[in-house]
Every structure is written in structure tokens, then in C-alpha cells.
Image: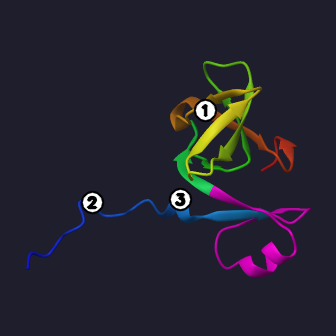
């Protein structure tokens, strides 16, 4: 029987990162919180898209983005299919990391992340 080798090695583990807003501050990464306890307390996890913005910052679900070619601010959402998109005033767009800048997130508004 022929052994099947993976076509490419998974190197970008950023997409498995999670952060949670606890009402006062943003908790990032692994080991800083008990995910089950946070979910039971009603906190919503924000998943990392695995993409980076124009200055190299990781883009998470709930981030507010400004696209170079648009005047609107977009929110990053995760569709039921698991795909991440940007949405603003009914407009939907794919996230192109090097063409967007993070300007805040839905928990803290513009600025602080």
C-alpha cells in the first residue's frame, strides 16, 4: 500500500489563535484563559483569520478594517461556512491582508486592540 504524504507542511499556526474580550481587556493566545469557563460566562471567542494587515498585525474576527480602496470601515465576520469576510453597510468583500489596516475592534471601538 502506498503511503500518502501531505502536499504541504502546515506552518501558519496563527489561524488557530483565539482572543476573548473579558469586558475590560483583551485576552490573547493560549494558556491565558480556560475556554470552557469563558464560554459558560457568556464571552464570545474571536478567531484569528491567519491573515495579517498592511503592517503585519494579525487580523481577528471582530476587527475593524479600513481598506486602501474604500472609504468605509469594515468589520471582520466569520460566515457559517467558516470563511472570514469583511462587511460594511451591506457590502461584503474578501479580506486582502496587505491592502487593509486594522483601526480597532468591535469591543473597544477604534484604536485600542
* Magenta stretch holds residue 44: yes
Mark 1 highlights which residue? 100
Pick the front one: 92 or 67: 92
Give the CA distance from mark 2 to mark 1: 27 Å
x%, y% of residue 56? 56, 44
Pick the front one: 56 or 59: 59
Mark 3 highlights which residue? 15
Q: Does residue 91 lie above or below 79 as drawn?
A: above
| Mark drawn on residue 5 | none
Whether residue 24 sits left or right of residue 77 in the image: it is: right
Q: Does residue 99 lie above or below 38 as drawn?
A: above
Whether residue 34 sits left or right of residue 96 in the image: it is: right
Quarter assignment of residue 70:
top right
Mark 2 highlights which residue? 8
Local crowd at mark 3 within 10 Å, few (<14), some, or many (≥20)? some
**First of labels 2, 1 by sequence position:** 2
At x 85% / y 51%, what residue is drawn?
A: 107
Magenta range is 21-47
**First of labels 2, 3 by sequence position:** 2
At x 74% / y 80%, what residue is drawn?
A: 36
Quarter assignment of residue 12:
bottom left
Q: How is the image coloured?
A: rainbow
Whether residue 92 sits left or right of residue 108 in the image: it is: left
Q: Secondary structure at mark 1?
A: strand
Amino acid at each position: 500500500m502506498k503511503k500518502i504524504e501531505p502536499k504541504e507542511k502546515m506552518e501558519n499556526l496563527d489561524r488557530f489563535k483565539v482572543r476573548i474580550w473579558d469586558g475590560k481587556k483583551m485576552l490573547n493566545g493560549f494558556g491565558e484563559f480556560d475556554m470552557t469557563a469563558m464560554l459558560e460566562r457568556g464571552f464570545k471567542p474571536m478567531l484569528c483569520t491567519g491573515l495579517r494587515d498592511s503592517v503585519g498585525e494579525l487580523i481577528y474576527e471582530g476587527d475593524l478594517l479600513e481598506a486602501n480602496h474604500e472609504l468605509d470601515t469594515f468589520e471582520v465576520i466569520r460566515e457559517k461556512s467558516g470563511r472570514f469576510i469583511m462587511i460594511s453597510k451591506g457590502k461584503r468583500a474578501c479580506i486582502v491582508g496587505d491592502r487593509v489596516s486594522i483601526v480597532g475592534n468591535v469591543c473597544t471601538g477604534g484604536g485600542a486592540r
